[in-house]
């Protein structure tokens, strides 16, 4: 007997045989990627609580998961983007559409009380490179996506838990006046 949460957990813990259950339950379709990040993304999409599973991903899988979620909302994505701008900079993920580009600092760590510091550093890095980032979209928004429960706006930078990216994107227009937007 296949149970959604158990099948997801088993797959994330390395039991590839649980992929059959994931398919039988409709979480995965035949031919879709059998990666932990994709399974987690699909589980989130099906309404399965995923916050405790995020911590099981390594940093690469964590970034891949973030890209899947942004893609679901119609964004193009690119990883590890290096730009030559005032000393150079690397950005974990850039997710862009015709209207806006989200420049994402992915943090798969606890962070403690240091989210204000992380947000400030990311804001400065984006500001240094805004001229080049505008090639992606006419509006640039720096954000930090975390594997923790941290959810705040600091220095105009939203810090968003990875399992709440969809909510963040769906309600972005409601608080875009509270975050830094470069044009």
Image (cartoon, rainbow, N blue to C red):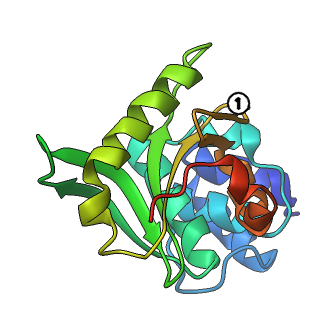
Position of 158 with respect to 4 (left or right) is left
Frontmost residue, 3 versus 42:
42
- Quadrant of the rendering where the C terminus is positioned: bottom left
Q: Residue at x 41, y 76 (%)?
A: 137
- Above or below, 147 against 183 in this view is above
Q: Residue at x 56, y 23 (%)?
A: 116
Frontmost residue, 129 versus 170:
129
Question: From this viewpoint, which residue is outermost toward the top?
Answer: 113
Q: How many marks?
A: 1
Q: Position of residue 106 (x, y in %)?
A: 47, 43
Position of 69 with respect to 174 (left or right) is left
Q: Which residue is mark 1?
A: 150
Mark 1, secondary structure of its residue: loop
Q: Residue at x 49, y 64 (%)?
A: 67
Q: Residue at x 52, y 26 (%)?
A: 109
- Observer able to see residue 141: yes
Q: Position of residue 170 (x, y in %)?
A: 78, 68
Frontmost residue, 94 versus 139:
139
Position of 105 with respect to 154 (left or right) is left
| Image quadrant in which you'd find residue 161 | top right
- Above or below, 76 against 89 in this view is below
Q: Position of residue 19 (x, y in %)?
A: 63, 67
Position of 20 with respect to 136 (left or right) is right
- Quadrant of the rendering where the N terminus is positioned: bottom right
Q: Position of residue 36 (x, y in %)?
A: 54, 56
């Amino acid at each position: 007997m296949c149970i959604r949460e158990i099948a997801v957990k088993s797959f994330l813990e390395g039991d590839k045989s649980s992929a059959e259950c994931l398919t039988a339950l409709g979480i995965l379709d035949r031919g879709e990627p059998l990666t932990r990040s994709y399974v987690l993304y699909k589980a989130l999409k099906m309404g399965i609580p995923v916050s405790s599973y995020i911590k099981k991903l390594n940093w690469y899988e964590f970034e891949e998961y973030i890209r899947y979620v942004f893609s679901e909302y119609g964004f193009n994505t690119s990883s590890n983007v290096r730009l030559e701008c005032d000393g150079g900079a690397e950005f974990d993920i850039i997710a862009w559409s015709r209207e806006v580009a989200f420049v994402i600092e992915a943090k798969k760590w606890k962070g403690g009380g240091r989210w204000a510091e992380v947000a400030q550093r990311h804001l400065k890095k984006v500001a240094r490179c805004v001229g080049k980032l505008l090639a992606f979209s006419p509006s640039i928004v720096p954000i930090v996506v975390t594997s923790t429960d941290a959810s705040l706006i600091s220095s105009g930078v939203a810090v968003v838990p990875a399992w709440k990216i969809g909510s963040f994107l769906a309600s972005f227009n409601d608080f875009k006046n509270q975050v830094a937007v470069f044009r």
